[in-house]
Image (cartoon, rainbow, N blue to C red):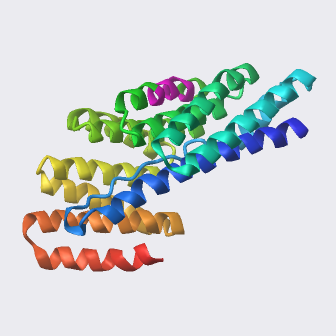
Amino acid sequence: MKNQNESLVILKLVLRSLVKALHSKRSHSLLSSPISALFISILLLSSVVIISGRLAISIAQQPETASTQATIATVKRLFSEADRLYKQGTAESQQQAIEKFKQALPLLQQLGYKVEEIGTLNNIGLIYSNLGDKQQALKYLNQALPLWRLLGDNQAKAGEAKTLNNIGLVYDDLGDKDQALKYFNQSLPLSRQVGDKAGEATTLNNIGKVYNDLSDNQQALNNLHSSLSLFQQIGNNEAKAGEAGTLNNIAKVYNDLGDKQQALKYFNQSLPLFRQ
């Protein structure tokens, strides 16, 4: 039981860093961009939320040795230091956070904690992306994909879909719209297969963004309205944030089309949701 509790602490630290990255990256974009030019992409960072049942199984297979306990304690310390450094928000501190995560990777591999390993790879990739090093971001996000596939169950497929979505966003940032669509279109059927409506809605939003960039506004609207419908069906607070972003994005497409009344309609629907 002690091993399980300590490993769950490690997982929570991974998740906390993922959520911080989400809020930092996307909130900054919202505040710094004029609303008429803003298109909100949605980064799915919660791909390790799905693990608790499998985690208990892997822990049960771990011998309760002093060495194992020491390794777990070291990983906890590294994640705590990475979290502290990431919160400082400077490029230097985020680079230092990456180094702490990299130090944790071989220890997680030694422990056999695959889920935490995937979360750490995602953390490293997403921080590199925030720092503008897109090639390093792709390197680490792509390392996470085969690990999800090895796990193989529906929960892992949902995680794989999220990682594919995030790789698509990196390619979108690089301006490679074809590659972005390729990864989004790999993500979408996996989300549908496992019934992950939030993942499906998010990827549809991001596909809409790419089509808007390509000036295919009808395809953009088709995907965005599908995304909006799913977010509204889900209805929880997290989905309301996605709904707000998608309403904003629909407004942006109408603004690009010169339909100012429709743009205002959707901007005005998104505003109270952003304020919640």
Please tell me whether residue 191 belongs to the stretch shown in magenta. no
Of residue 89 and residue 214, the one placed in the foreground of this image is 89
Of residue 210 and residue 127, the one placed in the foreground of this image is 127
- Can residue 122 be spotted in the picture? no
Q: Quadrant of the N terminus?
A: top right
Q: Is residue 143 above or below residue 204?
A: above
Residue at 44% in and 77% down: 275
Residue at 64% in and 47% down: 84
Of residue 270 and residue 52, the one placed in the foreground of this image is 270
Residue at 17% in and 62% down: 253
Count of numbered labels shown in the rendering = 0
Q: Main secondary structure of the magenta part?
A: helix
Does residue 163 appear left or right of residue 155 in this picture?
Answer: left
- Can residue 168 be spotted in the picture? yes
Q: Tell me where residue 222 appears, x and y as whole percent.
A: 22, 57
Does residue 3 appear left or right of residue 185 in this picture?
Answer: right
Magenta-colored span: 140-148
Q: Tell me where residue 231 appears, x and y as whole percent.
A: 42, 63
Residue at 46% in and 31% down: 141
In the figure, residue 266 lies in which quadrant?
A: bottom left
Q: Is residue 121 above or below residue 46?
A: above
Q: Tell me where residue 194 appears, x and y as whole percent.
A: 51, 44
Does residue 67 appear left or right of residue 262 in this picture?
Answer: right
Q: Tell me where residue 35 appears, x and y as whole percent.
A: 25, 68
